[in-house]
Amino acid sequence: MVLHPYEGDGAILAMTFQGEGTATTRFRYIRTNAFTNERKKGKKLYTGMESTRSSNVGVGNDFPLPFYRHHLLTGLNKLRKNTSNTRAIFFGKKLLSLWSGGLPYKLDSLALSTDGRSQLGGVIKREESALGGKAAFDAQRNRLLFYGVDEDSGSSQLNIYEFNSKFQPISDNDGAVQVKLPGLALMHDFAITENYAVFVQPALKLNGMQYMLSKEPGKTLTMDVEPSLVHIVARPSNKRAGEIATFQIPTDGATDANLQFVNAFEEQDGTVVFDAIRSDGSNMQGANTRWPWASSLGEYQSLSSKKSLWRYRVHPQNGFISKDCISNDQIYFGVINSDFSGRPHRFMYAAAGALGEDVAPPQGITKYDLNSFTFESWFPESYEFCGEPMYAKRRGDESEDGGYILSVLYNGRDEFSELVVLQASNIGAGPIARVPIGIAVPHGYHGCFASNDDANWTFEEIERRAKLADKMETRGSMWNEVKSDFSGLGLRFDDMEEYFGDLM
């Protein structure tokens, strides 16, 4: 048993709505190298973050999403298990799963079978130049941006990648820029505006000796209440691509580490505004490394940080302006209508605890009106718990809240899951539909909704592809889209860890 839910192997749940009240659901584990190796040998092979999980207290081990997400020792090794469990994205007819600290995995969109690790057509040059666990969508230009950080103790390199609608690097600057950042930059999220990519680098104290000896995050890093840094970086498509403006965020006694960005945009005078959910770990008291990790509200409250929603405003030339708390309620997984990504937004949706400002697990769905600063919520039964809300656009409706909110709900009493569908314009009314999934699905992290014709598959198409995928997996085939497919030994890139993993 893993010591934290974040260490679990990634799996993908997909539901395709064919119309007339029908839907096709499938669920499949991602066949990462680590998953395949452990399955073949019938035992646990990767220690991963076990030392940090068992000894560290606070935001680093936060529930459900920790700040310490990967070992600082780079490359393929037993301490850095790429579970590919953090985010699913569908763009340019491609389905990828992300993990903060490793290469993404490409999946078959219909069958959810694993094609292999991807270097995005060779844009990512080295395994050590791993991607972060977030992709940001530019709704105006139909583009997708990724980032990765080459972490080091003295300074780090930030890599930003920008792709067009065909999932090809844009022509400007070959779709990539590199920026130097001070110190060890541990960043797991970002947001984009029309011209910039926005990052927050938390203040960390680094133990140089432990960094040389172990690179174990729990021993090497300590989160500091010193001001975090906000980096405003010109995107690859910007005429000043790669230029960076860095400012301190005034501290109020709580760390700005582990921010979860909701959205960012530019005002007419150039001010960059971004909304984010902040984690304050001052309430956390311990680390539980046994299943169940929390079997009571009190246990969960000791393991999960206090959350709150904040709005930050900074001008790329004039500096930091303000940060204001929008809501002190316990919320998770903030999202918007993706058509407004990188643009001014009015509405935001989040999974919410049922105790208001007190720490509680994500259970209901809350909608915020950021113009009037009002909100409305819906909460299920006490034994039911919602995951991340996803905005699904209603065909033909261009309004910001004219679509639907989808969320996977887990019934803890009867141990099964279903998809709940709510009207985005009337969250308080509760679900207009509840779609049984047929199995109990573990709580997940980040998903997406694809509303275009690229994802409009029939049941027959999905079934045929799934049967083919099952045959391929039984033969042990794994195709990949990595630039350097073969080594001098005649082994595929994805085979290297399988053959030499015990030595790494």
Image: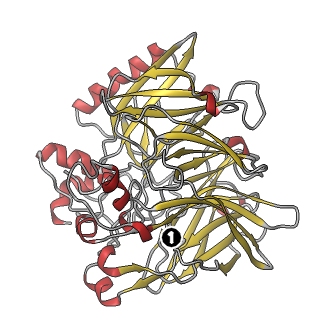
Between residues 279 and 504, which one lies in front from this camera angle? 279
In depth, the one of 201 and 357 nearer the eye is 357
Q: Quadrant of residue 463?
A: top left
Q: Residue at x 52, y 39 (%)?
A: 94
Task: Give the residue number, with chain letter if any, for mark 1.
Answer: 257
- As displayed, is residue 251 above or below residue 99? below
Give the crowd class for mark 1: few <14, some 14-19, many >=20 residues within 10 Å: many
Residue 273 in the image, given as x and y percentages of width and height: 73, 63
Q: Quick check: 147 above or below 93?
A: below
Q: How is the image coloured?
A: secondary structure
Look at 48% across and 44% down and name the residue there.
354
Q: Position of residue 144 (x, y in %)?
A: 63, 50
Is residue 294 shown left or right of residue 150? left
- The amino acid type, in three-letter code, at marker 1 is Ala
Horizontal and vertical percent position of residue 498: 21, 52
The outermost residue toward the bottom is: 209
Can residue 6 be seen? no
In the shown orientation, is residue 470 left or right of residue 245? left
Q: Nearer the viewer, residue 464 or 86?
A: 86
